Image (cartoon, rainbow, N blue to C red):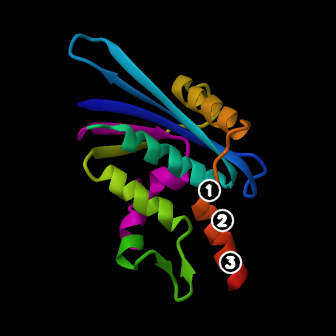
Amino acid sequence: MKVNIYTDGAARGNPEGPGGFGCVLQYTDRKGNLHEKEISGGYERTTNNRMELMAAIMALEALERPCEVDLYSDSQYLVNAFAEHWIDGWIKVNFRRGKKNEVKNIDLWERLLAAKKPHKVTFIWVKGHDGHPENERCDRLATSAADGTDLSKDEGYLAAIDNAKED
């Protein structure tokens, strides 16, 4: 099954404000009918990069069986991690950058790798805020979620802040 996924993340006052993610999943069945699903959510305190990752995670986790996926994102952080094979290097060194520094957002990178595993995913970069209809739609979903009142706690972000204070 071929699925197109469009994602975006947003954070107000990045890196210390509320944030949200939005994604649109599209599938055309054998009869030519387009099926779409929107997913979005927001967090009290987070970063834009975390929301970009969360959008991809939530979209891939929504798939109920292995799929061939084209995942479109305006996040070079997300797309280049796979296109430039940064993720392969990070895995080899257990997500470390030097002796003391860890790659940021390990919790989400690991969750993304698990969500991606059953699928054949191609990550495709699109220029943000450039009129791409699905990217603009995802941006509206993400920013609306960030501006919402039913915001969750980004436990991974809060744990990273606590760990940084201890160092």
Q: Please provide percent x and percent y for residue 93.
A: 40, 79
Q: For the residue carrying disc 3, how many other residues have a C-alpha within 10 Å: few (<14), some (14-19), or many (20+)?
A: few
Up/down of 1 relative to 114, above or below: above
From the viewer's side, name the closer residue of 99 and 124: 99
What quarter of the picture does the N terminus occupy? Answer: top left
Q: Secondary structure at mark 2?
A: helix
Q: Whole-percent x and y of residue 42?
A: 64, 43
Residue ID for mark 1: 154
Q: Residues within 10 Å of mark 1 (few under 14, many from 20)?
A: some
The residue that appears at 64% across and 29% down in the rendered structure is 140
Distance CA(mark 1)–CA(mark 3): 16 Å
Q: Which mark is residue 158?
A: 2
* Point 62% across, 70% down: residue: 160
- Which contiguous range is marked in magenta? 65-89
Q: Position of residue 66 (x, y in %)?
A: 23, 41
Location of residue 156 in the rendering, given as x and y in whole percent from the top left corner: 57, 63
Q: Is residue 141 above or below residue 53?
A: above
Residue contact at pointers 1 and 2, CB within 8 angstroms: yes
Q: Quadrant of residue 142?
A: top right
Residue 160, compared with residue 123, is above or below; it is below
- Marks 3 and 2 in Cβ contact (< 8 Å): no
The kind of secondary structure element at disc 1 is loop
Residue 73, magenta (yes or no): yes
Taking 6 as reference, is 15 left or right? right
Whether residue 10 is visible: no
- Pick the residue in front: 4 or 141: 141
Q: Secondary structure at mark 3?
A: helix
